[in-house]
Amino acid sequence: MTTYIADGARDRVITMEEKQAHLDAFIEVLDFTPKKVLLLPPDHTRLYSDAGPITDYLYKKLVKTAEVVDIMPALGTHAAMNEKQLRMMFGPDIPLDRFLIHDWRNGVSEAGVVPGSKLSEFSDGKVDYKMQVKVNKALLEGGYDLILSIGQIVPHEVVGMANYTKNICVGVGGSDMINKSHFLGAVCNMETILGRAESPVRSVFNYAYDQFLSHLPIYFILTVIGKEAEEYVLRGLYIGDDKDAFEQACKLSQQVNLDLLDKPIKKAVVYLTPKEFASTWLGNKAVYRTRMAIADDGELIILAPAVKEFGEDHQIDLLIRKYGYRGTEETLKAVNENEDLRNNLSAAAHLIHGSSNGRFSITYCTDPDKLSKEEVEGVGFKWAPYSEMAAKYDPEKLKDGLQTVDGEEIYYISNPALGLWALKEQFE
């Protein structure tokens, strides 16, 4: 097991030429010429991961010698990407027929089962259900001799730090593993998981991968993204076939992507860029990534110009509308009493994660023609019109961090997907 590339530092900026040289070096050290390749990048909801340009470069390089190079965006439960989104993410050159669509409900095959005893061990007895390890059929039956999992290491609400085995077990995984892993993270307390390389959910993913999927020719290409002069830059690039590359990338991400504050935020204003966020299923990163930093009785204002639905998946959207973001206790009660929610535990976990448990208020500011006041308030949030709130808190003028707007102190975040905001004492 090997780490092939490990380049990164807190103040490092890896240029395009350096990045491409690293990718070339990795391909050159493989002891064979791959003939059938599968690339597994994220979708457009990770637009700033640098996975799009990396995928484009690798496709153009590998297609010169390979018979087939396919690309399967690791959608998880997200909606399939349309042509506009594919071009925005991966550029204009890759033929559209090379993109495969992951179907998390029907397009998977079983590789094994994690026993309930392991889930109990990893969760300290909080859950004891077994978990089917299913991944997209292409990985198990497609005959690929090289599979490249591409993605960003960044704090994550379910697993602690995104990517690595999560990109396989969730990104191209099946419903049982997605549902039960998300619920596991919820019952194990998200705030003890966020920003940490080790977690109960990570333990399950690593166990599932090591036991049932490690025979596959999978290599992990991991990025760490930071911000410099209002631009996103590549701080780290790590490539390997085992946990070592992931752990190195995590250490850097914890330096780059954790904003640790001295005092709680009384009022946070978070902007959801239309390129990435069209649902609360995705937009609630504004809640997940800030909740550790927001003061008791504080306020979270979410500027959401493109949000038009709750769940990208129709069934999940209906469940969110039915049960709402009512807090941990009420959601767990609903799981126990209702089969529809019990059969979709990832939705239940999302409802828990998306609530402040009454500790601070959450106001979604939407275009009422896309998502109305009645719909937003119906799921338990406060509502305000986007046009009015964007005039007061103008995303074109605000800079990330603490500032004063019309005599009011706010903390502004331009993209919640790229970090975690917490108090220093929480990571001592």
Image (cartoon, helix red, strand yellow):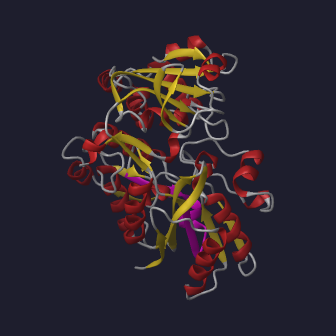
Residue at the extreme top of the image, as rendered: 374
Residue toward you, 223 or 72? 223
Percent of width and height locating residue 176: 43, 45
Percent of width and height locating residue 248: 39, 67
Residue toward you, 37 or 46? 46
Residue 140 part of the magenta segment: yes
Residue 29 part of the magenta segment: no
Residue at the extreme bottom of the image, as rendered: 31
Q: Quadrant of residue 265?
A: top left
Percent of width and height locating residue 94: 77, 62
Position of residue 191 relative to residue 280, above or below, is below
Q: Which residues are magenta?
A: 132-150
Q: Along the horizontal axis of the image, is 259 left or right of 367?
A: left
Q: Residue at x 65, y 52 (%)?
A: 101
Q: Along the horizontal axis of the image, is 205 left or right of 220?
A: left
Percent of width and height locating residue 415: 55, 40
